[in-house]
């Protein structure tokens, strides 16, 4: 189906949901997909504009010509390692649906640990001000706002195209009144004297030399500026740690996502800058994923 009509039959053939999946799954597996069944089902559900679960109740239902044509296009693109999230233009994160495209880093389940940790810090506070840096799709800011109604979030993104996606996601989830989007470089667009209870960030943290070793769907399709963290991956993390105390209230917290191999160095940087209660925290896969620190002088969260 994805290469030529003869590969998958002729126009006279009846292409049911079952047959499309039976053809697509091995096709994608042979072309490097690590989750070919999941990929095939997500793409087919998108082509049919139905929930994925409905495919199981429509196994013997033929596709329309329009659905078949769209599915063929999607499979061809997936075979070149284009991420499924870009093909269907959305990704679930923290049980919320977000628009994504080639201008934004695709939200990962590991990053949900950042949200969980943030919500734990915010739990004792009836109201709070949160700053997110390097917001990308705004999934972290939106998830925090949706799950802590007393929080107002300022979220910052450098890239204009990425910021447009973030703005649409903020609007999609109806949190415009509590999530303010600013475009600029890290702390640069903030108002003078502004202070926050919590600063969160999932900055680029992949060492430059390692980018070429990434899987093709990441290396060749996701925005390089969302990946490249400099020689050791800590360029932006250093900048954030250095400036964060000036934007935190007493007892305010900083937390950032990074690679487990960077946790020790990042914790050392936090301590050198005067942060207390410094800790590296594991994600659901038991990899160190989040580093946290409290502004000097704090007695706790």
Image (cartoon, rainbow, N blue to C red):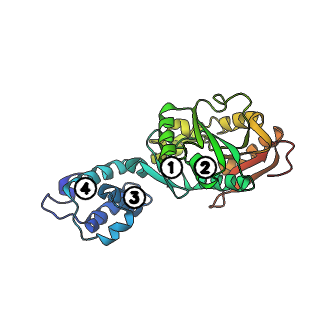
Of the two numbered discs 1 and 3 on the same chain, state the one appearing first in sequence. Answer: 3
Is residue 184 shown above or below 123? Answer: above
Judge from the rendering whether residue 270 lies leftward or rightward of residue 286; answer left or right: right
| Callout 1 secondary element | loop
The image shows residue 201 at horizontal and vertical percentages of: 64, 43
The mark closer to the camera, 2 or 4, is 2
Residue at image mark 4: 67
The image shows residue 91 at horizontal and vertical percentages of: 47, 52
Residue at image mark 2: 145
Residue sitting at x 23%, y 68%: 61
Of the two numbered discs 4 and 3 on the same chain, state the one appearing first in sequence. Answer: 3
Tell me the number on the disc at residue 173: 1
Judge from the rendering whether residue 229 lies leftward or rightward of residue 293; answer left or right: left
Judge from the rendering whether residue 104 lies leftward or rightward of residue 236; answer left or right: left
| Callout 4 secondary element | helix
Determine which quarter of the picture holds residue 12: bottom left
Of the two numbered discs 2 and 1 on the same chain, state the one appearing first in sequence. Answer: 2
Per the model, the C-alpha gap separating discs 2 and 1 is: 10 Å
- The answer to whether one can see residue 258 in this image is no
The image shows residue 293 at horizontal and vertical percentages of: 77, 46
The image shows residue 216 at horizontal and vertical percentages of: 45, 46
| Callout 3 secondary element | helix
Per the model, the C-alpha gap separating discs 1 and 3 is: 26 Å
Quadrant occupied by the N terminus: bottom left
- Is the residue marked by circle 2 packed among few (<14), some (14-19), or many (20+) residues within 10 Å? many
Of the two numbered discs 3 and 2 on the same chain, state the one appearing first in sequence. Answer: 3
Are the residues tagged 2 and 1 within 8 Å (C-beta)? yes
The mark closer to the camera, 3 or 2, is 2
Residue at image mark 3: 39
| Number of numbered markers | 4
Per the model, the C-alpha gap separating discs 3 and 2 is: 30 Å
The mark closer to the camera, 1 or 4, is 1
């Amino acid at each position: 189906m994805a290469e030529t009509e003869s590969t998958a039959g002729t126009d006279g053939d009846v292409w049911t949901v079952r047959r499309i999946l039976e053809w697509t799954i091995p096709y994608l597996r042979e072309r490097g997909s690590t989750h070919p069944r999941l990929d095939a089902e997500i793409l087919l559900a998108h082509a049919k504009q139905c929930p994925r679960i409905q495919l199981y109740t429509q196994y013997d239902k033929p596709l329309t010509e329009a659905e078949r044509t769209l599915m063929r296009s999607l499979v061809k693109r997936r075979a070149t390692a284009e991420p499924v999230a870009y093909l269907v233009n959305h990704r679930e994160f923290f049980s919320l649906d977000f628009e994504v495209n080639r201008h934004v880093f695709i939200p990962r389940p590991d990053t949900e640990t950042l949200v969980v940790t943030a919500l734990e810090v915010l739990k004792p506070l009836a109201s709070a001000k949160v700053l997110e840096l390097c917001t990308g799709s705004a999934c972290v800011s939106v998830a925090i706002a949706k799950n802590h109604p007393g929080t107002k979030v300022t979220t910052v993104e450098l890239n204009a195209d990425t910021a447009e996606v973030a703005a649409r996601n903020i609007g999609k989830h109806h949190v415009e009144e509590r999530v303010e989007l600013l475009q600029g470089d890290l702390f640069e667009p903030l108002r003078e004297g502004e202070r926050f209870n919590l600063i969160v960030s999932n900055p680029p943290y992949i060492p430059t030399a390692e980018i070429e070793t990434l899987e093709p769907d990441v290396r060749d399709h996701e925005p390089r500026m969302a990946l490249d963290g400099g020689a050791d991956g800590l360029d932006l993390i250093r900048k954030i740690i250095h400036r964060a105390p000036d934007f935190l209230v007493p007892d305010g917290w900083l937390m950032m996502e990074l690679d487990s191999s960077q946790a020790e160095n990042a914790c050392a940087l936090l301590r050198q800058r005067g942060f207390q209660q410094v800790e590296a925290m594991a994600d659901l896969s038991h990899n160190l994923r989040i580093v946290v620190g409290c502004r000097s002088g704090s007695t706790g969260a």
